[in-house]
Amino acid sequence: MSGSVALNTRVLPQVRAGRNAGRLLERNFLVYRRAWMIIFSGFFEPLFYLFSIGVGLGALVGEVVGPGGTPVKYAAFVAPALLGSSAMNGAIYESTFNIFFKLKYGKIYDAVLSTPMQPADIAVGEIAWSLIRGAIYAAGFLVVMAAMGLMPSWWGLLALPAATLIGFAFGACGMAATTFMRSWQDFDLVGLVVLPLFLFSGTFYPLSVYPEAFQVLTRFSPLYHSVEIIRALTLGAFDWSLAGHVAFLLGMGAVGVTIASRRLGRLLLK
């Protein structure tokens, strides 16, 4: 048409949230390859508990009632719970202290957002790195269990993907909680939550020994669901309740990812 100017508008396709998360994983790998000992620092605490309580105290306790009512050695009962705790520790350490430093002091994410990456990419990438760290802890602990004869069932090999699920759940919620932290003093609350979870999630005793009201509260503990999955796999005791435990951790992780993504968007794009 004469006298008119044709305007061509090009609409950029929307990038799917989390698509570039692999770039952040690559960055974390490059950073930690020269500080790999830090990755294994949290692995030793559950290992010390295994030798002191599982083996030492286990010599006095003897056998306890395991999944399905089958008597098992106390060390074999405690070890799967400590494996789940290892996965939790790895994910929590990475998704709280380290992410808080990057967010508030290192300003790493401000630089990341100068690239095509979005806050959702940061959330997915960091949560993925957290679950990888948890899985590394769990893999090392699983080797120790196998060497000590504390994994009587070959189904115990599935404890590694189960530990990855645990890392996902705790990593996502840990990162979501970190976005609300204002100072290092707030991290005292992390210990206030993690320590009771570690001690009172059926870690060292069967759930049946607790008072009935405490049993109800324990079933809301994410570590309790984690312990039940790992214990059932390593001892080869299965029932339909495992589906409920898996669903609980998946839901926990999904909620954590959603909150972390939205909170990062508000903090970084304000």
Image (spheres, grey):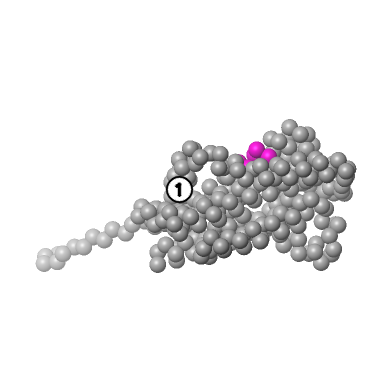
Q: Nearer the viewer, residue 87 or 152?
A: 87
Q: Residue furthest top?
A: 147
List x then y, in percent, for residue 171. 58, 53
Query: Image quarter for residue 140?
Result: top right
Q: Amino acid at mark 1?
A: Leu
Badge 1 is on which residue?
A: 24
Query: Image quarter for residue 51?
Result: top right
- Residue 257 vs residue 251: left or right? left
Q: Residue furthest left?
A: 3
Q: Is residue 232 above or below residue 218?
A: above
| Category of crowding for the residue at label 1, using alpha-carbon neighbours closer than 10 angstroms: few (below 14), some (14–19), many (at least 20) | many
Which residue corresponds to the image point at 64% horizontal and 39% vertical from the top-left?
139
- Residue 61 vs residue 18: left or right? right
Q: Which residues are magenta?
A: 136-141
Instruction: Quarter of the image for the C terminus: give it.
Output: bottom left
Which residue corresponds to the image point at 58% horizontal and 57% vertical from the top-left?
174
Instruction: Quarter of the image for the N terminus: give it.
Output: bottom left
Which residue corresponds to the image point at 55% horizontal and 55% vertical from the top-left?
96
Q: Magenta region, mostly helix, strand or loop? A: helix
List x then y, in percent, for residue 161. 64, 44
Per the image, is 139 magenta? yes
List x then y, in percent, for residue 64. 87, 47
Residue 15 visible here: no
List x then y, in percent, for residue 54. 79, 43
Residue 192 visible here: yes
Element under label 1? helix
